[in-house]
Amino acid sequence: MRSKILALSKNEEFKKLLKKKKISNKYVTIFYGNLNDMNNKKLNISFVTKKKIGNAVKRNKIKRRLRNIVNDAIKEISIKFNYSYLVIAKPTMLSNEYTNIKETLLKSFEQIK
């Protein structure tokens, strides 16, 4: 089954989202808002990990975890597809368990409604 996730690609999209609303928890900061000219049939979301977090292996592990959590969230809760999301990871993601991170992120996505 193909994923319903579509990544943001243009620099202007990132800049516009950073000026929109945000929700923060101890694992990530989620910027979200309605961007024009976006595909509403797919989830427009991008995952960002800063170089301060660690080497490429650690950063990719965080992105894989986030992608997996968002795929599960699409099935479990109703995420708004008309919004675009920018998920910026924090260093605490590496030191905590997957289940704790997943619970916290699902609560954050439910608050966005």
Image: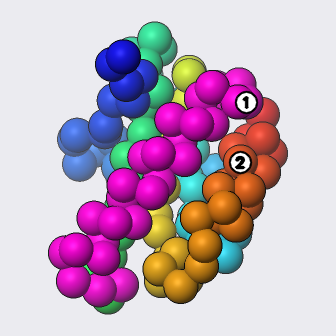
Q: Which residue lies furthest to the top in this view?
A: 41
Residue 68 is marked as none
Residue 79 percent coordinates (x, y): 65, 29
Residue 33 percent coordinates (x, y): 57, 38
* Mark 1, other Cα within 10 Å: few <14 / some 14–19 / many ≥20: few
Q: Is residue 101 left or right of residue 84?
A: right
- Tell me which corner region of the image, top left, top right, bottom left or bottom right, holds residue 96: bottom right
Q: Residue at x 55, y 52 (%)?
A: 31
Q: Earlier in the sequence, mark 2 or mark 1?
A: 1
Question: Label 2 belongs to which residue?
Answer: 106
Residue 2 percent coordinates (x, y): 33, 19
Residue 76 percent coordinates (x, y): 70, 30
State the quadrant of the C terminus: top right
Height in image: 63 above or below 6? below
Height in image: 82 above or below 72? above
Please state which amino acid type lies under the numbered disc 1.
Ile
Is label 2 in contact with label 1 (beta carbons under 8 Å)? yes
Q: Give the range drawn in magenta.
A: 53-80
**Disc 2 and disc 1: Cα gap in Å?**
8 Å
Q: Of residues 40 and 79, which is closer to you in this image?
A: 79
Q: Residue at x 23, y 48 (%)?
A: 11
Q: Residue at x 37, y 25 (%)?
A: 3
- Say if the magenta span includes residue 45: no
Question: Label 1 belongs to which residue?
Answer: 77
